[in-house]
Image (cartoon, rainbow, N blue to C red):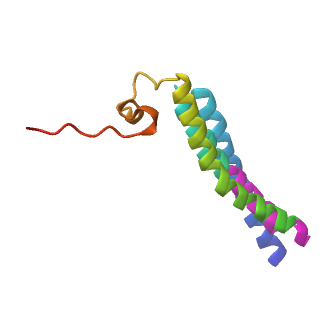
């Protein structure tokens, strides 16, 4: 009975992880600019991979496999947002601009990453 519940939980986690990974892949193909694509790849891709690794950790009978899967989840949680942020800043500095349908560009107001002081009203 417990093995059946474990298999159902692992199967549902695999479906959820596959859905988020598929959503990240669709986002890479369909979103309009580099920054939106990077957001889809880093957020949805990391969540999908993390849930799939969690399914592996629940299914594995070996403690070393469980430890490696949990370490990979922690590594993804620590590195994916930071690397996406740094890549986006480097892409902006290299000249990749936002999609023309974007509402607001915060980086245009802050050259070299420094916020410009607001003008004083006199």
Query: Quick one: which residue is furthest to the bottom in this view?
Result: 1
Tell me residue 1's x, y (percent): 82, 78
Residues in magenta, as a range = 48-64
55 vs 98, left or right, is right
Tell me residue 35's x, y (percent): 53, 33
66 vs 102, left or right, is right
Placement of 44 over or under 93, stated as above or below? below
Please report the residue visible at 72 percent of the width from the left and 57 percent of the height from the top.
Answer: 75
81 vs 17, left or right, is left
Placement of 78 over or under 45, stated as above or below? below
Question: Can residue 51 be found in the magenta stretch?
Answer: yes
Q: Which of the 4 quarters of the picture holds residue 77? A: bottom right
Please report the residue visible at 81 percent of the width from the left and 71 percent of the height from the top.
Answer: 4
Examine the residues drawn in magenta and state their main secondary structure.
helix
Q: In which quarter of the image is the C terminus?
A: top left
Placement of 36 over or under 60, stated as above or below? above
Residue 61 visible in image: no
Question: Can residue 118 be found in the magenta stretch?
Answer: no
């Amino acid at each position: 009975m417990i093995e059946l519940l474990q298999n159902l939980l692992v199967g549902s986690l695999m479906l959820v992880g596959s859905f988020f990974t598929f959503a990240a892949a669709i986002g890479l193909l369909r979103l309009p600019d580099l920054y939106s694509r990077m957001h889809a790849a880093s957020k949805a891709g990391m969540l999908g991979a993390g849930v799939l690794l969690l399914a592996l950790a629940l299914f594995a009978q070996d403690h070393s496999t469980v430890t490696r899967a949990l370490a990979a989840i922690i590594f993804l949680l620590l590195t994916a947002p930071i690397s996406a942020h740094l890549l986006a800043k480097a892409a902006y500095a290299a000249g990749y601009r936002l999609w023309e349908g974007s509402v607001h560009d915060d980086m245009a107001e802050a050259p070299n990453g420094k916020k410009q002081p607001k003008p004083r009203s006199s």
